[in-house]
Image (cartoon, rainbow, N blue to C red):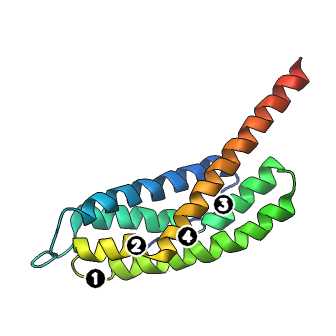
Amino acid sequence: MATNHTVSGGNSRGDCRHRCDTIEESYEFMLAYAAQGVSGEGQQSGGQAREYLNRAAAALAGLSEVFSAAVTQERFAHQERYRAFLAVLDRDARDALAAFELVLAQPAISSQLVDNLNASIHVRALLTDLFLIDEALKTQSRATNVSSVKTTE
C-alpha cells in the first residue's frame, strides 16, 4: 500500500517537482515494462515494476496538497485560478492512485496488465496535469528570477 505523505513546512515547490519527476519516471519504466511481454505466470511479485508502482503511488498521495502549499508559500499571483485547478488535480491523482493500487493488489504483474494501466484515461489525465504543473512552476520560477534581478539593479 502507498504511504501518506504529510505536507512539510519546507520547500513545497521542490517537493511538487520531485513527486512529478517520480511519477513520470515510473510511467516511463511502465512503458518499457509493458513492451517486454512479461506473462506474470509463475511470478509472485513483478519485482521492479512493483517497486516503481509503489514509488508512484507514494508520490501521488497528497500531491494536490503539496501543490497547494507551493502556491501559498510562493505567493503566486491569481491564486484562485490555481485553487480551481487543484480540484482537478486532486480528482485525477485519486483516480490514478486507485488504478495503481489495483495493479499492486495483484499477485503477479504482467506486461498486459501494465499496458492496460498505461492506457488508462485516469493515468493519462494525471500525466497531462503533471506536465501542466511542471510548466506552471517553471514559469513562476522564471518570473520570480526576473523580478529578483530587477529589484537588485
Q: How far apart are labels 1 and 2 at the CA level?
A: 18 Å
Asked if disc 1 and disc 2 are in contact, CB closer than 8 Å, the reply is no
Give percent across and percent down for residue 71.
77, 55
User: Which quarter of the image is occupied by the C terminus?
Assistant: top right
In front: 148, or 88?
88
Write the residue at 80% across / 56% down.
72
The residue beneath circle 1 is 106
Q: Is 141 placed left or right of 75 in the picture?
A: left
The residue beneath circle 2 is 119
| Element marked by disc 2 | helix
| Element marked by disc 4 | helix
| Three-letter amino acid code at the position of disc 1 | Gln
Badge 3 local density, few (<14 within 10 Å), some, or many (20+)?
many
Give percent across and percent down for residue 74.
79, 48
Asked if disc 3 and disc 2 are in contact, CB closer than 8 Å, the reply is no
Q: Note whether 62 is above or below 20 in the view shown.
A: below
The residue beneath circle 3 is 66
Query: Hey, which quadrant is residue 62 in on the image?
Result: bottom right
Q: Earlier in the sequence, mark 3 or mark 1?
A: 3
Give percent across and percent down for residue 94.
56, 77
Give percent across and percent down for residue 17.
58, 50
Q: How far apart are labels 4 and 1 at the CA level?
A: 23 Å
Disc number lying in front (4 or 1): 4
Q: Is 105 placed left or right of 139 in the picture?
A: left
Q: Which mark is residue 125?
A: 4
Q: Which mark is residue 53?
A: none
Badge 2 local density, few (<14 within 10 Å), some, or many (20+)?
few
Q: Note whether 119 is above or below 145 in the view shown.
A: below
Q: Earlier in the sequence, mark 4 or mark 1?
A: 1
